Amino acid sequence: MKVLITGTSKGIGKAIAEKFLSRGHEVIGMDILPATIEAPNYSHIKTDIFSGELPEIAGVEILVNNAGVQDSGRDIDVNLKGTIRVSEKYAFQDKIKSVLFIASSSARTGAEFPEYAASKGGMVAYMKNAALRVAKYGATANSLSPGGVKTALNERVMSNPVLWGKIMDETLLPKWAEPQEIAEWAYFVTVVNRSMTAQDLLIDNGEDAKANFIW
Ligand SMILES: NC(=O)c1ccc[n+]([C@@H]2O[C@H](COP(=O)([O-])OP(=O)(O)OC[C@H]3O[C@@H](n4cnc5c(N)ncnc54)[C@H](O)[C@@H]3O)[C@@H](O)[C@H]2O)c1
């Protein structure tokens, strides 16, 4: 299938691109940074999803909106407006089979940075709007809301043993996900899944669920 993924130069987006490539799909990556993947079925578009040029790409079958920033002063622009811009350009056409959004557990909890949480909450609402509009093509639209994932985005706390210990105390399964696990979810939700749509999946190692019974 023809798969367009944003934010493929690092982290979760790179892992998702590698997952699709390993299954023989054609992957078009879009990132503000140069390509870091070299593979016969991979092509790269270097652009800013919010303000850069979005080239014509016919017949995208799977769109994964992954590119994002955190506490950047541009969180609403990139995470929300950029994602909407990319989706409006490529998703609503008759070849589309699935649209996926990488949101965040902060969309549900409101925790983390204010504009980041708002951008991801908006993304989940937009995902539902997209699901209503791609249904006529027989396509699904869903989002993944990861808790902590081990990427460069979180270097600050991952490299600080005291902060890391506090985070683990807040996490029911005391660990964070690897980007490759999020890639497995992305593949399942967009390719294997044909019946779930307009849903947001929380993948947070039980951080949101953790509750202490005081008696
Ligand atoms: N890492 C986590 O703990 C975590 C948790 C929940 C959600 N997320 C979300 O997952 C997505 C990927 O995060 P990550 O941890 O892999 O981050 P990352 O910083 O490692 O990778 C993000 C990628 O997006 C690209 N990008 C940033 N702004 C862009 C723009 N304007 N145009 C095009 N590309 C742009 C970056 O260059 C980079 O390659 C983000 O949307 C993030 O909010 C991450």
Image (cartoon, rainbow, N blue to C red):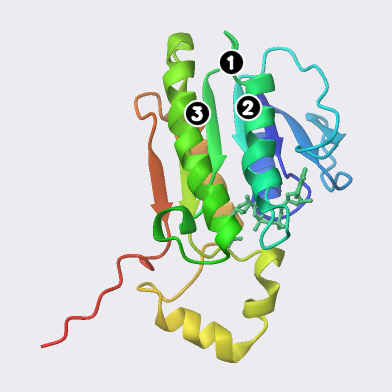
Give the tally of numbered discs.
3
Q: Amino acid type of disc 3?
A: Val
Q: Residues within 10 Å of mark 1 (few under 14, many from 20)?
A: some
Question: For the residue labelled by badge 3, is the local secondary structure a helix, a strand or a loop?
Answer: helix
Q: Position of residue 52 (x, y in %)?
A: 85, 34
Question: For the residue labelled by badge 1, is the local secondary structure a helix, a strand or a loop?
Answer: loop
**Mark 3 in CB contact with mark 2 (< 8 angstroms):** no
Precedes in sequence: disc 3 or disc 1: 1
> Where does label 2 land, which residue?
87
Evaluate whether residue 25 shows in this view. Answer: no
The residue most toward the left is: 215
Q: Amino acid type of disc 2?
A: Ser
Residue sitting at x 57%, y 49%: 119
Residue sitting at x 51%, y 87%: 165
> Where does label 1 land, which residue?
92
Q: Position of residue 90 (x, y in %)?
A: 67, 20
Precedes in sequence: disc 2 or disc 1: 2
* Ligand 1 within 8 angstroms of badge 1 C-beta: no
The mark closer to the camera, 3 or 2, is 2
> Where does label 3 land, which residue?
191
